[in-house]
Amino acid sequence: MIHYRNLTENELCRELFQNFIRHQNVTECWRKVDGTWGVKSDPFVDDWTEADYQTLVACLKNTVATGGFVYAAFCDDVLKGFVSVESGLLGRGQNYMDLSSIHVSEDMRGQGIGRALFRAAGEWAGKKGAQKLYISAHSAVESQAFYRAMGCVEALEYQQEHVEREPFDCQLEYRL
C-alpha cells in the first residue's frame, strides 16, 4: 500500500534514496528544431551517480529550508516517489511556482504515484498563491506523455535559468 507525506529537512539524506531506482532507458526525445516540435531518436540511459544523489539531497534540503514543498510516496516504508516545489513566485507576473523535481522509482511507474504527487504539488502551489506550475521537464517521450496527460502545455514564458541549465528539457506550464 502506498502512503504519502511531507518530508522534513532532517529526513533528507542519502540513505532515504537507498532503494530508489532512477533508471530510465530513453530511446526518443522531443526536440524543438526551427520552432517546430518533433520526436527524434536520442538513445541513452538516464540514471543518477552518487554525486547526483548528493546534489539532489542538498537541493531538497534547501527547498524545505526555504519554505518549499517536498512530498513523497512510500511503499512499506521505502521511498518510491517524490515531488518538490520551490517557495518563491516567479515569472513576469509572479504567477508561477517552480516544480523543481518529480520522480517515481522505476519499479513503481505506471501505478498512479506520479499523478498523485503532481496533484499534491499543484494543490500546495495554488494555496501559496501561484496560478501555474513551471516545469523544466525531461524530454523523453515517456516523460512528456506523463506531463501532457496531466494537462501541461508548452510554457508561455520560459525561465532562462532552466533553459541554460538543461537545454534539452521541455519548458512546460500547468494552470492551477
Image (cartoon, rainbow, N blue to C red):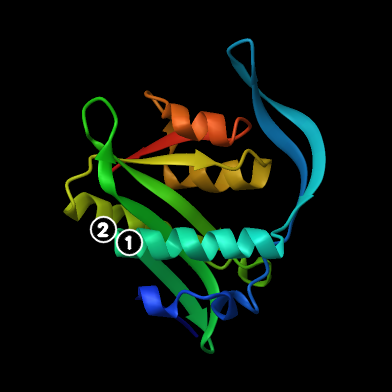
**In the image, 15: left or right of 86?**
right
| Mark-to-mark CA distance, 2 and 1 | 7 Å
What secondary structure is marked by label 2? helix
Percent position (x, y) of residue 73? 47, 74
In depth, the one of 86 and 169 nearer the eye is 86
Image quarter hosting the C terminus: top left
Name the residue beneath numbered marker 1.
69
User: In the picture shown, does residue 117 fall above or below 98?
Assistant: below
Q: Please tell me in which quadrant of the rendered image residue 152 appears.
A: top left
Q: Please tell me in which quadrant of the rendered image residue 23 appears.
A: bottom right
Identify which amino acid the numbered label 2 is placed on: Trp
- The answer to whether the residues at label 2 and label 1 have Cβ atoms under 8 Å apart is yes
Which residue reaches farthest bottom?
76
**In the image, 79: left or right of 142?**
left
What secondary structure is marked by label 1? strand
Q: Is residue 6 visible?
A: no
Q: Is residue 134 visible?
A: yes
Mark closer to the chain start, 2 or 1: 1
* Mark linked to residue 124: 2
Please state the total of marks drawn on the protein image. 2
Percent position (x, y) of residue 47? 72, 57
Q: Residue at x 62, y 68 (%)?
A: 105
**In the image, 5: left or right of 53?**
left
Percent position (x, y) of residue 1? 50, 85
